[in-house]
Every structure is written in structure tokens, then in C-alpha cells.
């Protein structure tokens, strides 16, 4: 489903200085996989996630989604690919504080100008139930705990039924109990929907949930482990 072929990325840090964020990365990720990307800060894992998610472009190499190169598209076409095929869960949640749980989850529909109000309402309510927040549906985001906000972010990432969900350090700002709860929710969704999850993390406690661990060091794949 997802093929990354010899992808490299440099960032300019001065007049003539560059950081090689990614160096000739090649990787295949199949439909329904639950994959962890691990590495130290600055190893290149977030850069890789941003390139997969059409938030950044590689300098060289190709990224194919369903055998279609996604980075030879114009900005509008990449935005459509991102909105229709890729969900995001951010470390800082990126919720709108004054919006309710329901309104935050509904936001991708509004951005895409989706007019199917009745069907989207049912879908949103179903996702709110799945992440265990039915009793908080009318609470504003700024009234929620960190774990609850992360569950809202998960539901929002899934509301457009993406093929792939990308998560960057999704357990960094929540405690161990909530981290395990979040991972169990994601694994259940992964199995039931065959949604592919690619999760960048420093957290060794969530490794047990992964099908594969891809370790990146200095912009290169260091090792790929199959989780037991």
C-alpha cells in the first residue's frame, strides 16, 4: 500500500550548512499494519512522518500510496490526498479549546466542506462512543484531561475513514495508564477497520503493541524488528 523508495531530505541551517535529516530511506508498509518508528530526537523519524503525510516533500526519492506517486502532485492535489487518505494524531493534541468534543471531531468534515450532515453525525457519535467519551460530548476541549484530549484527537483522525493514521509521540503528554488505554483503542480500531497506523515514539512501554518496530538513527534505517 505504502512504498518509500530511496527518500532523502536535507534542511539548510546556515548559508552553506545542511542537516541530512533522511538518507536514502526505503521502506514498504502494508494495509492494516501497526508500525512503530523509534529513534532519538533528531534521528529523522518526524521528518519521515511529515513526508508520508504530505506535510513536507523529499529532496530525492519517491513515496507511493496505492502505487501512485504522491509528491509529483501540486499543492491542491496533495491536500486532497492528505484529507481523504491520511489521518493525523499530534503530540500536542491540536484541539480548538473552546470547541466541544463533538465540534473538534467534526472539524475535518467542515474543512472538506462535506455536506452529508446526517451520515457524518452518526459517524461522529459512533467514534465518540468507541473512544469512551460519550458522557463528555458537550464538554469543551479545555475542560478535558490530557488522556481525554488525546482520545478526541484519535477520533478526529479517524472521522474521514483514512487508509493511514500517522501519530507523532502520541503518549508523550499522558501517564502510563492512559498510554495503555490509548494503545488498546488504536489496536482495536486497527483490527476492526484494517486501518494502517504509523507511530513515531520514544516510549518503550508501547513497543509491545506494534507489529513492527523500525529504528532510525542519523537519518537511516538502523534495524527493523518484528514484535513478538
Image (cartoon, rainbow, N blue to C red):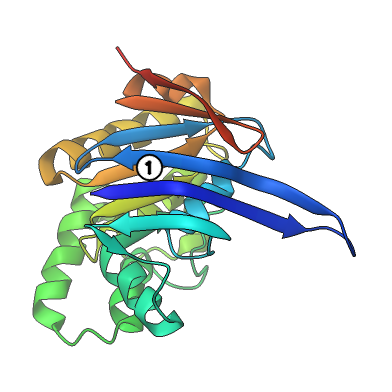
Q: For residue 39, which quarter of the picture?
A: top right
Left or right of 2, for residue 119: left
Q: Is residue 200 left or right of residue 68?
A: right
Q: Residue at x 50, y 70 (%)?
A: 96
Q: Is residue 171 left or right of residue 210?
A: right
Quadrant assignment, res 101: bottom left
Where does residue 128 sit, x and y in percent of width and height?
24, 56
Q: What residue is at 45 percent from the left and 29 percent from the top?
A: 214
Tell me where residue 66 appears, x and y as whole percent: 21, 57
How far across and down, in percent of the image, does residue 156 sit? 33, 61
Q: In this picture, is 64 found above or below 31?
A: below
Residue beneath disc 1:
198
Q: Nearer the viewer, residue 43 or 59?
A: 59
Residue 136 visible? The answer is no
Q: Residue lying farthest right? A: 15
Question: If the image is split into quadrants, where does the C terminus sit?
Answer: top left
- Left or right: 138, with 206 as reference point: left
Position of 85 relative to 148 (above/below) = below
How many numbered marks does the figure carry? Answer: 1
- Residue in view at x 25 percent, y 36 percent: 33
Could you say where residue 143 lies in the image, as x and y percent from the top left? 49, 58
Whether residue 4 is visible here, answered yes or no, is yes
Q: Residues within 10 Å of mark 1 (few under 14, many from 20)?
A: many
Find residue 42 and report its image quarter. top right
Q: Residue at x 42, y 81 (%)?
A: 74
| Element marked by disc 1 | strand
Task: Name the one closer to the observer, 88 or 129.
Answer: 88
Residue farthest along the top direction in this orientation = 228
Amino acid at each position: 500500500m505504502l512504498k518509500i523508495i530511496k527518500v532523502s531530505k536535507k534542511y539548510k541551517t546556515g548559508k552553506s550548512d545542511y542537516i541530512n535529516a533522511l538518507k536514502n530511506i526505503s521502506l514498504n508498509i502494508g494495509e492494516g499494519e501497526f508500525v512503530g518508528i523509534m529513534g532519538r530526537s533528531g534521528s529523522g523519524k518526524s521528518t519521515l512522518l511529515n513526508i508520508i503525510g504530505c506535510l513536507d516533500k523529499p529532496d530525492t526519492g519517491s513515496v507511493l500510496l496505492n502505487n501512485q506517486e504522491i509528491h509529483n502532485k501540486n499543492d491542491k492535489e496533495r491536500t486532497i490526498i492528505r484529507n481523504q487518505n491520511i489521518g493525523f494524531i499530534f503530540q500536542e493534541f491540536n484541539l480548538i479549546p473552546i470547541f466541544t468534543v463533538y465540534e473538534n471531531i467534526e472539524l475535518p468534515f467542515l474543512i472538506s466542506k462535506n455536506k452529508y450532515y446526517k451520515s457524518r453525525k452518526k459517524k461522529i457519535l459512533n467514534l465518540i462512543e468507541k473512544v469512551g467519551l460519550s458522557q463528555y460530548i458537550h464538554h469543551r476541549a479545555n475542560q478535558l484531561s490530557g488522556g481525554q484530549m488525546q482520545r478526541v484527537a484519535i477520533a478526529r483522525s479517524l472521522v474521514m475513514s483514512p487508509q493511514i493514521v500517522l501519530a507523532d509521540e502520541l503518549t508523550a503528554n499522558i501517564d502510563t495508564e492512559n498510554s495503555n488505554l490509548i494503545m488498546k483503542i488504536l489496536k482495536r480500531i486497527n483490527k476492526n477497520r484494517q486501518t494502517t497506523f504509523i507511530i513515531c515514539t520514544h516510549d518503550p512501554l508501547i513497543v509491545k503493541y506494534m507489529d513492527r518496530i523500525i529504528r532510525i538513527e542519523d537519518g537511516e534505517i538502523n534495524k527493523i524488528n518484528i514484535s513478538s
